[in-house]
Image (tube, rainbow, N blue to C red):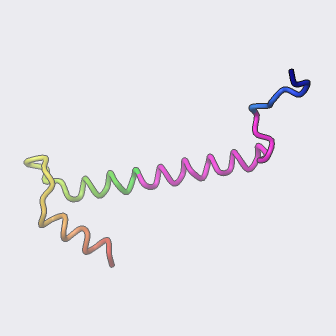
Amino acid sequence: MSLIAESTIPTVSPRGAERKSNRLLRLLNAIVEARTRMYLEAVTDPATGRIDPALERQVLRMMAL
């Protein structure tokens, strides 16, 4: 039997850096989700609830500028 127990706690990264990266990931996820919602809202026809191909092309052109 080994006298040294294996640790499951990572000792490489400090907690401050972990929190900052976690905040950064949450921020990036929030931005991506917001952009996705805006895009889907912009290309969806309110009358039918389906994506309008002509409107989608127009929105993609505007996003590329």
Q: Pick the residue in front: 56 or 12.
A: 12
Image location (x, y in percent) of residue 7: 79, 31
Q: Is residue 18 above or below residue 2?
A: below
Residue 53 horizontal/vertical position (percent):
13, 63
Furthest-left residue in view? 48
Tell me: 40 left or right of 52: right
Q: Residue at the spot x=13%, y=50% of the render?
A: 50
Q: Which residue is drawn at 86% across and 20% down?
A: 1
> Where does the magenta region start and end?
9-32
Q: Nearer the viewer, residue 11 or 14?
A: 11
Q: Is residue 31 magenta?
A: yes
Q: Residue furthest top?
A: 1
Residue 24 falls left or right of residue 4: left
Question: What residue lies at 20% left-to-right and 58% top-to-bottom?
Answer: 43
Above or below, comparing residue 31 to residue 18 in the picture: below
Query: In the image, residue 23 lies at what x, y percent?
Result: 61, 48
Q: Taking 26 as reference, is 60 left or right?
A: left
